[in-house]
Amino acid sequence: MSNHRVFAMPFAKVYPLYVQKAERKQRTKAEVDQIICWLTGYDAAGLKQQIEQENDFETFFAQAPAMHPNCSLIKGVVCGVRVEEVEDPLMQKIRWMDKLIDELAKGKAMEKILRQ
């Protein structure tokens, strides 16, 4: 397994950055939470617990109840990398989340972000 530094980064440190990015574009924390819960299967209490425990990304995704079956429909580029071509499964999950938050910040409708 590769040892990307982001894997050991606490999710609780990145989460407020996701919220700030969304709020700068007149989106809400509730929408960020909805996206994260849709992707990972966490409910609001589970997400809150992950943030309070300051689990790293590796633990955050390892403890996720269930990745959404439509997450394979997430396509596009984040940081110059096509998310569907990322080989490391954990890095791909992180990139999927980044992509969804990017789509939110760009004003995309929630139905499209959540691949409905």
Image (cartoon, rainbow, N blue to C red):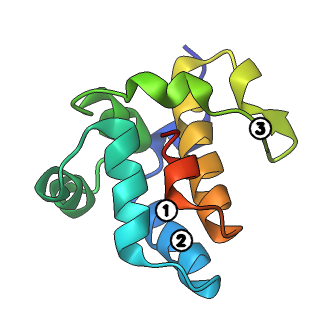
Closer-to-camera residue (6/78): 78
Q: What x and y, as percent, mark residue 38?
A: 35, 44
Q: Between marks 3 and 2, how big is the CA–CA gap? A: 21 Å
Q: What residue is at 23 percent from the left and 44 percent from the top?
A: 42
User: How many tags in the picture?
Assistant: 3
Secondary structure of the residue carrying numbered label 3: loop
Q: Residue at x 31, y 48 (%)?
A: 37
Above or below residue 2? Residue 26 is below
Name the residue that disc number 2 marks: 17
Q: Nearer the viewer, residue 2 or 93?
A: 93
Circle 1 is placed at which residue position?
14
Q: Amino acid at mark 3?
A: Gly
Q: Is residue 66 visible?
A: yes
Q: Earlier in the sequence, mark 3 or mark 2?
A: 2
Is label 1 in contact with label 2 (beta carbons under 8 Å)? Answer: yes
**Whole-percent x and y of residue 64?**
27, 33
Q: Nearer the viewer, mark 1 or mark 3?
A: 3
Q: Which residue is mark 3?
A: 76
What amino acid does circle 2 point to? Answer: Leu
